[in-house]
Image (cartoon, rainbow, N blue to C red):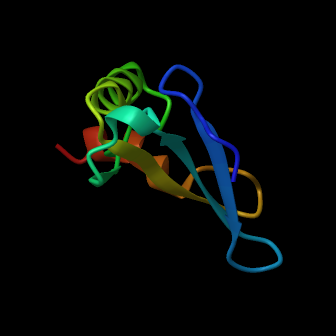
C-alpha cells in the first residue's frame, strides 16, 4: 500500500458485491511521528468524507501522529452515496 500524506490522502475502495462498493480516505501520520493509534471518522447526513470539517480534522489528527480513516461511504449501484440519501427529507419532517 503506497504511503499517503495528510495533505494528500489515499483513496481506498472495497468492492462488497459486483455492483456495490465502499470508499474511504486514509490520512496517514508521518512514520517518525506515528503514535500507533488509528481513528475512523464517520460523517453525518448532509456531509461527506470530503467536507471541509472532515478534511481539516483528519489532516490535523494525522499531523499529530494519529492515522485517520475518513468515513467508509457505501455507494448505490447508481453511484449515489447512501449516507447522504434522505438528508433533504429530514428537514421536511419537522
* Residue for point 47% across, 26% down: 6
Single out the residue that lies furthest toward the front. Answer: 32
Q: Nearer the viewer, residue 12 or 91?
A: 12
Q: Position of residue 54 (x, y in %)?
A: 36, 31
x 52%, y 44%: residue: 26
Q: Quadrant of residue 15?
A: bottom right
Can residue 90 be spotted in the picture? yes
Given residues 82 and 22, the one toward you in this image is 22
Count numbered badges in the picture.
0
Please, which residue is most extreme toward the bottom here? 17
x 57%, y 33%: residue: 9
Q: Is residue 51 left or right of residue 74?
A: left
In the rendered image, which quarter contains the N terminus?
bottom right
Where's residue 31, x and y in %? 45, 38
Q: Is residue 77 left or right of residue 7?
A: right
Q: Is residue 48 left or right of residue 24?
A: left
Residue 47 visible in the shown view: no
x then y, percent, for residue 13? 69, 57
Residue furthest out toward the right: 18
Locate the C terminus by quadrant. Answer: top left
Measured as percent of width and height from the top left, residue 87 is found at 39, 44
Seen at 68% across and 66% down, the residue is 14
- Would you say 90 lies left or right of 3 here? left
Q: Residue furthest left?
A: 94
Q: Up-down: is 7 above or below 61?
A: above
Amino acid at each position: 500500500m503506497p504511503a499517503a500524506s495528510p495533505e494528500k490522502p489515499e483513496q481506498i475502495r472495497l468492492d462488497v458485491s459486483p455492483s456495490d462498493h465502499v470508499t474511504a480516505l486514509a490520512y496517514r501520520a508521518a512514520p517518525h511521528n506515528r503514535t500507533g493509534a488509528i481513528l475512523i471518522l464517520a460523517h453525518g447526513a448532509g456531509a461527506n468524507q470530503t467536507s471541509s470539517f472532515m478534511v481539516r480534522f483528519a489532516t490535523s489528527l494525522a499531523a499529530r501522529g494519529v492515522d485517520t480513516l475518513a468515513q467508509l461511504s457505501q455507494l448505490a449501484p447508481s453511484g449515489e452515496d447512501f449516507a447522504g440519501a434522505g438528508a433533504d427529507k429530514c428537514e421536511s419532517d419537522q
